[in-house]
Amino acid sequence: MKTEILFRADANTIIGHGHLVRCLALAELLVNEFQISFFCHEITESILNYLQKVKIKCNLISGEDEFLGYIKQNNVVVLDGYNFNSDYQKRIKDTGAKLICIDDIHDKIFYADLIINHAPNISANEYKAQYYTKYALGLEYALLRNEFFIKPKKKESSNTKNTLFLCFGGSDYENYTETILNNIAPNPCLEKIIVVYGDKIKYEHLKNQFVNKKQLELFYDVSATKMCNLMDKSDIAIVPSSSIAIEAFSRNLFIITGFTVDNQKSIYNGLTQYSGVFGIGNFAKVNMNSVNQQINCFFQNNVKVDNKIQENHKLFQLIIDNFYTQ
């Protein structure tokens, strides 16, 4: 019988989809070797529908005690969320199960058997963990969804038509999308702007506001396949320094990125060390003149990006070596 991995994460309009999307990426990587189950207190309809589509079981729980009651000694538990503190981790370890923590803020003592943090240039020295804890740190352990493991084709300038990709994930609580769009839409360098929204109300509002803008293509709640295809049709991405920035990095886009919350700073600080990534700091204080200058500079200088993230990926083998049993 296959070892069962229990994923515990949530998604809503406030915290966004990031925790669950990272878990989905890991689940897709491991689904042929392990039995997979998700446990969610809160989940968006689109993610729930996707789990049902790919036949991954999702248990809707009323609280943490209910989840802890499911755990058996031979299970592997994956946690992704800021509320899973040290005591909670110890309770899981006390069941005899193995524990994997997906993390991006290293703000607590960890009791995990494995910590995954795909921020570039992160170090194990930044963590307080146990003698037995192993680490999967950096882009070679990136939590990419299956579609993003397909290496992107070389971009031909005749196919992309000066296209910019804009997305702030599943929440965009502060509505940075609209603010940035209002400032870049007049830029004559941009022949097309692709915008992906995760919030239906904001998507409908933006669609009505820009109804006459022929250069604008709006999409709502797209699949990973569609997201990947839209990125591959683009030259530049404006994205926050979350998992979506790493996905854009994997598609060899020139990236203009910043952070919207403190937990994005590790990815921001790491990605902006690469030549194909331009950092603009806090999106709440963004200088739009600087953004437009970078857009113009990219097209004027015909910048080429080739990151080869897919060729160096090690996460699957690491988990097989440490958690797979027959």
Image (cartoon, rainbow, N blue to C red):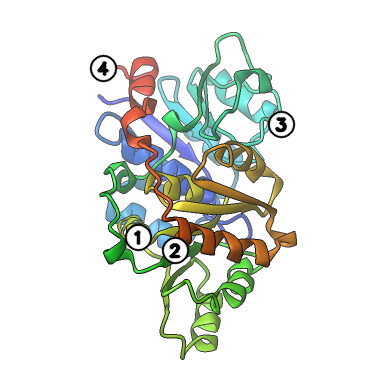
Q: Which residue is mark 2?
A: 45
Tell me whether circle 3 and circle 2 mark residues in contact (CB < 8 Å). Answer: no
**Rendered location of residue 231, percent (x, y):** 37, 58
Mark sitting on residue 27: none
Q: Residues within 10 Å of mark 2 (few under 14, many from 20)?
A: few
Query: At 33% from the left edge and 65% from the top edge, which residue is drawn?
Result: 160
Q: Which comes before the other along the chain, label 2 or label 1?
A: 2
Query: How far is disc 3 from disc 4 in space, using C-alphas?
Result: 35 Å
Amino acid type of the residue that numbered disc 4 sits on in the rendered structure: Gln
Q: Which comes before the other along the chain, label 1 or label 3?
A: 3
Amino acid type of the residue that numbered disc 3 sits on in the rendered structure: Asp
> Tag 1's secondary structure?
loop
> Tag 4's secondary structure?
loop
Q: Which residue is mark 4?
A: 326
Q: Nearer the viewer, mark 3 or mark 4?
A: 3
Using the image as rendered, state which of residue 170 and residue 43 is in the foreground: 170
Q: Nearer the viewer, mark 3 or mark 2?
A: 3
> Tag 2's secondary structure?
helix
Q: Is residue 319 above or below residue 20?
A: above
Tell me whether circle 4 and circle 2 mark residues in contact (CB < 8 Å). Answer: no
Query: At 27% from the left edge and 26% from the top edge, which residue is drawn?
Result: 2
Q: Which residue is mark 1?
A: 223
> Horizontal placement of 48 versus 9: left or right?
left
